[in-house]
């Protein structure tokens, strides 16, 4: 699995390299800022989920699937850059390095985020399937999408941590984009309704497992191991799984989500082997 | 012309009303912030240019053209919200009202901008023509697009005002989106290459006229008349047409752009009458 993931990441990185304007393209500074954050050692989980969402159908790799996969990483990176801004989470450290605004200043970080968001759609525009554009925008947007989650998250800092609010935050904040990662691969690979439903369920459960484990790691791990500031959730009064359910129940919930993710893949056979391994990797990871 | 424009604006506003999530949709605050800035009395020049770009072809109004037109206003509004932020232009007043971040706070203003940018592409995704997605993203992006212009503009504050830098800033910062407004209407209306070339030229010249007049008005008019802080360009050492060429030459340049905009429309006959009037309106406006 480690070898497989390293290979996938290298291929995703090569595709991103080709899609992002070079540092020698004017205006230099914005392209430097975009690249600084995109090539900061991300795990590329969303692109890999997208690739495997297509491969699970067992019909070979569709043309331009790497562009579709990269659009997801661009959206993810934009959201990290804006999330880290002083007006939002005010974080100095991301993936073990100073955040974009610490290096390039706030103005350039805001614009670098805007640029990656815009480029994600330019890439999909060239792929040529409008369904993917609508899907990515929905998953990133204010109605059940990523921004909805960020807003609930910001507002939640003032509220008591309830299970209902937690569910609302995470289904939107990280869940929607992770789910769409698998779905976009599946749609681009020509999934029928039945296949798309099953892969959507997989994406939903794998996404929830991801977030539960993320919250657990924020409590358990050091900043060094995470490459970002640990313990911030508690410090910022964030509504997290451990805060609502405690660590033991949270761990059990992550296991349940893993099991449901596996269950959703029943109809696919060996072509979905990597998706099964990814669900395990997401649940068992230590950083 | 005034009646015509008022009618067009009402129709664009009605379309925007239908496309933006309501203030009763959760999370309320983000939808309130988006609507606050979108319905702040904008002139809707980009949507109207888009509508007339389609109508100039003389083949009736294509289906869903209002959605295409609204996507341009969403991009424009997002750029204003982010431009006004403390880290960028730090402006308190826009269209005669406090700016988005003054009312909703910086975090929500950043997210409201992100949301409008995302929604613009969701709308185009549903329209279903990927060429429009690629066009809008390109016009908004970092390579010759709006963000390129913003970056040149920010960096230009430290540089001597040269004609070359001025051209680079405005061709990208406002020119690209105004040009694409006409082009997107034309593409959606089924323009052939020859028609699209001519309307692109029109959009380029009308866009340049718009920016030259904008720079002149910033010098000549009061904040009250403009509905935004006047005289900011000089205060911020911005590179403008009056700063590089003086007011008289700038006025003459605006007239030249108007004439070239008219010239580009020669092949279209009466169907392009509104585009001609719009070029005049852009050049003669006082706010």
Image (cartoon, coloured by chain):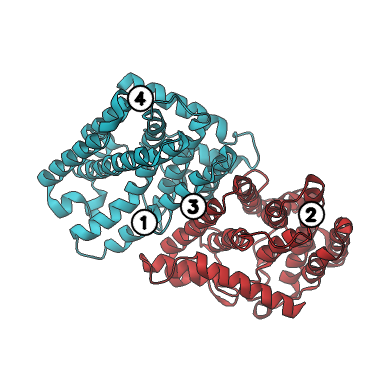
Chain colours: A red, B cyan
Cα separation, mark 3 vs mark 1, equals 28 Å
Mark 3 lies on residue: B106
Q: Which mark is residue A199?
A: 2
Cα separation, mark 4 vs mark 1, equals 30 Å
Q: Position of residue B219 (x, y in %)?
A: 19, 44
Mark 4 lies on residue: B5
**Residue at the image position 26 percent from the left and 37 percent from the top:** B264
Give whichever of A91, B242 is nearer the camera: B242
Q: Do the residues labelled 2 and 3 touch (CB within 8 Å)?
A: no
Cα separation, mark 2 vs mark 1, equals 39 Å
The nearer-to-camera label among 4 and 2 is 2
Give whichever of B168, B84 is nearer the camera: B168
Cα separation, mark 4 vs mark 3, equals 33 Å
Q: Where is residue A20 in the image (x, y as percent from the top left)?
A: 49, 65
Q: Can residue B221 be seen in this view?
A: no
Mark 1 lies on residue: B144
Q: Do the residues labelled 4 and 2 touch (CB within 8 Å)?
A: no
Q: Is residue A86 left or right of residue A156?
A: left
Q: Give the vertical position of B286 relative to B102 (above or below).
A: above
């Amino acid at each position: 699995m480690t070898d497989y993931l390293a290979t996938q990441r290298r291929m995703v990185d090569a595709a991103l390299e080709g899609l992002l304007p070079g540092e020698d393209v004017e205006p230099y500074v914005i392209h430097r800022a975009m690249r600084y954050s995109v090539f900061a050692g991300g795990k590329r989980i969303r692109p890999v989920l997208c690739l495997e969402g297509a491969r699970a159908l067992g019909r070979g790799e569709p043309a331009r699937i790497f562009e579709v996969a990269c659009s997801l990483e661009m959206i993810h990176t934009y959201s990290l850059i804006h999330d880290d801004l002083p007006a939002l989470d005010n974080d100095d450290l991301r993936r073990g390095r100073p955040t974009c605004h610490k290096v390039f200043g706030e103005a350039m970080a805001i614009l670098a985020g805007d640029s990656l968001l815009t480029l994600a759609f330019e890439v999909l525009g060239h792929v040529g399937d409008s369904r993917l554009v609508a899907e990515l925008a929905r998953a990133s947007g204010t109605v059940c999408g990523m921004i909805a989650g960020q807003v609930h998250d910001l507002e939640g800092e003032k509220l008591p941590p309830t299970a209902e609010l937690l569910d609302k935050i995470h289904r939107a904040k990280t869940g929607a984009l992770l789910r769409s990662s698998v779905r976009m691969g599946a749609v681009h690979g020509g999934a029928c309704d039945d296949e798309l439903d099953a892969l959507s369920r997989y994406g939903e459960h794998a996404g929830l497992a991801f977030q539960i484990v993320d919250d657990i790691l924020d409590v358990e791990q050091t900043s060094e191991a995470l490459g970002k500031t640990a313990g911030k959730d508690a410090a910022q009064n964030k509504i997290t799984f451990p805060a609502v359910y405690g660590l033991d129940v949270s761990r059990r919930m992550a296991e349940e989500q893993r099991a449901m993710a596996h269950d959703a893949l029943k109809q696919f056979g060996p072509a979905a082997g990597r998706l099964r391994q990814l669900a395990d990797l997401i649940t068992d990871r230590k950083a």
